[in-house]
Image (cartoon, rainbow, N blue to C red):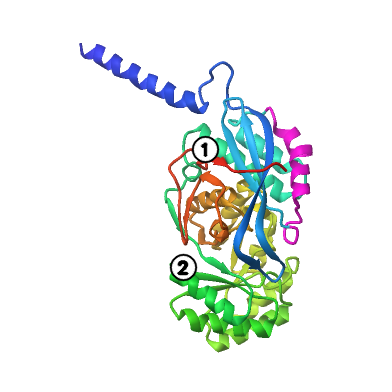
Amino acid sequence: MAETVFVFFVEIIIFKLKLIYGKIGIINHGGEVMKITAIEMERISVPLIRPFKTALRTVDSVEDVIVKIITDTGNIGYGEAPPTPVITGDTIGSIVGAIKEVISKNIIGMKIEDFEEILIKLDKCMIKNTSAKAAVDIALYDLFGQLYGAPLYKILGGGKKELVTDITISVNTPEQMALDSLEAVKKGYTTLKIKVGKDSEMDIKRLKAVREAVGEEIKLRIDANQGWTPKEGVRILRKMEDSGIDIEFVEQPVNAYDIDGLKFVTDNVYIPVMADESVFSPKDALTIMQKRAADFINIKLMKTGGIYNALKICSLAEIYGIQCMIGCMLEAKVSVTAAAHLAAAKSVITKVDLDGPVLCKEDPVTGGAVFTESLIKLENKPGLGIEGIKTSKL
């Protein structure tokens, strides 16, 4: 009798496993093994609540390419890429062309279970084109999570489900920036990322106005977006130090390619320096770390070409004892959800700058992470948890 009961329960367990794994493609039914059969691209256009202004550009809406990787099991992996010509050099045309003419031809027909092989092919099939690669990489990681029925952050080894992000305050008059900062604080933000770099003397006035408006408890981090020369950066940052504004760190004070200039600033001010546009690849990150050219590294999936290389940067940062921030371009919820999963998985990512979705007037994405002002919550759904997107044709 006991043996019969035992066999009965074993059969039930096997049956349940078949039901679960059969749905997500691990068990082969009729040759379906989650093989890539097609890659489709569409477009989203989402207006911003207010214009986004930096030292490099002014933007009124998010205009991104949405990537859908379709498999023989019916599973769909979602990715996203914003055209950011002044930073990545990518346009909508170049993103679409790279995926259609090169990337698709290299990975269609491959099985998601051969994950490392696919990612290596994606990384090596062409140079640069990091936004196109990132969109495909994100969609692949989405499918990898679906394959094993787990949220991506758990697949990557993480356990926390919540993150707290800062919010960006665009370059404006000191008075307007103070008002925008106060509004953000009233919504619950405790860290503000202040855009500077257009006029060094005016930058001090902007920071003083913001600090006076929000008080001493709110953290202020500043982003110059390559707006200063090395000597100008040192001069302006020393003035900020002397004025007692209290800055958490300064992001990318000098030109992206001027690593010596970046180190000059880092070595000559007390305010910590973060490298952003200077770091696209793991090799870039290694150079920064070996030269001690910056105190922190800003990881953005659109610069690294996706999660695959971002993980390598995280490993280097762990070795060199350097903290990282996870950031984003002007992106909607698909790619920012992917970035949030990475941040939730890696303890070396201690700072979060994922405010893209809350800067938008509307959300075209169903599913994914839940963005409630400064709080980001990850759902317990396979992969990225994206259920659908309102898109238009390219």
**Residue 145, which numbered label?**
1
Task: Check the image and report above or below for 369 versus 260.
Answer: above
Which residue corresponds to mark 2? 189
Q: Position of residue 134 (x, y in %)?
A: 66, 47
Give the camera-side residue of 321 and 103: 103
Rounded to the nearest whole Å, what is the CA distance between mark 2 and mark 1? 31 Å
Query: Mark 1 falls on what kind of element?
Result: helix
Of callouts 2 and 1, which one flags the residue occurring earlier in the amino acid sequence?
A: 1
Residue 90 lies in the magenta-colored region: yes
Query: Mark 2 falls on what kind of element?
Result: loop
Q: Which quarter shows the N terminus?
A: top left
Mark 1 crowdedness (10 Å alpha carbons): few <14, some 14-19, many ≥20: many
Q: Position of residue 341 (x, y in %)?
A: 51, 49
Give the camera-side residue of 149 and 51: 51
The amino acid type of the residue labelled 1 equals Gly
Task: Check the image and report above or below for 174 versus 310.
Answer: below
Residue 229 sits in which quadrant? Answer: bottom right
Give the camera-side residue of 33 and 286: 33
The residue lying furthest to the bottom in this view is: 242
Inspect this view and state whether residue 321 appears: no
Residue stretch in magenta = 85-109
Residue 358 lies in the magenta-colored region: no
Tell me what residue is drawn at x 72 percent, y 73 percent. 261
Tell me what residue is drawn at x 51 percent, y 46 percent. 368
Q: Which quarter shows the C terminus?
A: top right
